[in-house]
Amino acid sequence: QTTLDIAVIPGDGIGPEVITEARRVLEAVLDSAGVGLRCTEYPLGAAHWLETGETLEDDTLEKLRGHDAILFGAVGADPQDDRVPSGLIERELLLKLRFSLDHAINLRPSRSYPGVTSPLRGVGEESGPQIDFVVVREGTEGPYVGNGGTIRRGTAQEIATEVSLNTAHGVRRVVADAFARAASRRRKLTLVHKHNVLTRAGDLWRRAVEEAAVEHPDVSWEYMHVDAATIHMVQDPARFDVIVTDNLFGDILTDLAGAISGGIGLAASGSINAEGTAPSMFEPVHGSAPDIAGEQIADPTATVLSAALMLQHLGHAGPAARIQAAVDAQIADWARDPQASAALSTAARGEALLRRVLAG
Ligand code: NAD
Ligand code: IPM
Ligand code: MN
């Protein structure tokens, strides 16, 4: 019997709440497929740092490398909590994982669900526009690398820099991945950047796309500045199939994508190691949501769908499809009585998804 060996990092805030539900669904779907599951929990995050002073130790990182994949909730302190320096957990834990495990491809699919309330839905309209696109966000470079610095801090002459790092290797591999995905979807690729201002990085990205396009004559591509992309994403999201973009633009666009497709609580992601040299990591797009943490009102669907992306990645397409089908059916059910479903707890949502998976 195959057994999947998964590292689980619940994290902070709503992270543990949504991970609990995703684990239940994962266990159920694998059990009925006759696939074993071994989960090892790693208590990392802001709360762990406050207790121990540890963000991510080298030996913990080595242990994480040994698993088939990582299921990640969310980390980060309440921005009001001044005991935790801003960016410490994000940089020293989350980004350290993405960088060390070479998560070059940050995959963030978005779909609309019939009947689900979207801010794009007109008054009296049954459903909003058809959304079905995937943002292929570069995951290891851009302004996220942390090159930069501050000098003369606190003086009138203070200088703060953040450098955006773009390598030909990093850009080419994410572009190649995006073209391959487009080729197996609706064969349309949009490069989102801002080459009218970020001329050097923009030029590298544009050439990478032009070169890859030669290998994929079946895929049509267009270029779009990131500011305009936010207009089109709101006014005509159906025009997008695959969007390829840098780390920071991808971060911003995918919160917007989550919001228009029915809520950030539905947005799943995978941080993929394209070469298979280390485990990939699957996590909701959202954060630790300190504003609702502990209230059992977070939507666990994004984490459940991230678990489905994980199964897909690990070659278990059947169980992954079963989760997706269960989510589709359950969301359609919830949409029939939006008032009642809005009042459901995190656990009640997880329970409903679990029952759907078992029934499917
Ligand atoms: P956030 O995504 O945590 O929350 C933004 C808004 O979305 C909040 O109003 C929140 O209540 C809501 N929301 C988020 N997830 C939800 C869910 N599942 N169901 C219902 N509503 C949900 O973003 P933020 O407030 O900017 O960040 C909070 C903390 O999380 C910060 O410390 C930040 O650095 C961190 N963060 C971590 C990750 C991650 O671990 N991958 C991602 C984003 C932010
Ligand atoms: C995300 C988050 C992270 C990012 C932060 C917490 C470092 O916003 O996963 O979208 O910017 O990538
Ligand atoms: Mn983000």
Image: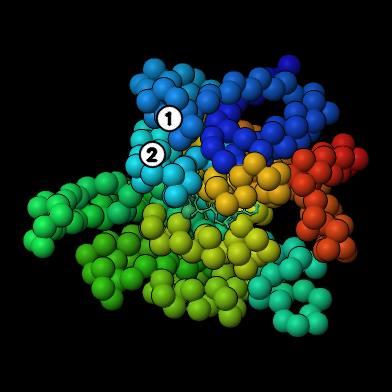
CB under 8 Å between callouts 2 and 1?
yes
Quarter of the rendering occupied by the N terminus = top right
Q: Relative to the observer, which residue lies in front, 115 or 4?
A: 115
What residue is at 57 percent from the left and 76 percent from the top? 234
What residue is at 34 percent from the left and 42 percent from the top? 85
What distance separates the C-alpha of mark 2 from that of mark 1? 8 Å
Vertical order, 37 against 46 (above or below): above
Vertical order, 87 against 128 (above or below): above
Q: Relative to the observer, which residue lies in front, 3 or 11?
A: 11
Give percent across and percent down for residue 298: 67, 49
Secondary structure at badge 2 equals loop
Res 21 seen here: yes
Give percent across and percent down for residue 62: 41, 20
What residue is at 82 percent from the left and 63 percent from the top? 338
Is ligand 1 less than 8 Å from the beta carbon at label 2? no
Marker disc for residue 303: none
Of the numbered discs 2 and 1, the one sitting upstream in the chain is 1
Q: Is residue 345 left or right of residue 102?
A: right
Q: Residues within 10 Å of mark 1 (few under 14, many from 20)?
A: few
Give percent across and percent down for residue 256: 54, 65
What residue is shown with label 2? 83
What residue is shown with label 1? 50
Indicate the amino acid at tag 2.
Arg
Residue that extends furthest to the right in the rendered view of this protein: 359
Give percent across and percent down for residue 126: 81, 76
What residue is at 61 percent from the left and 45 percent from the top? 293
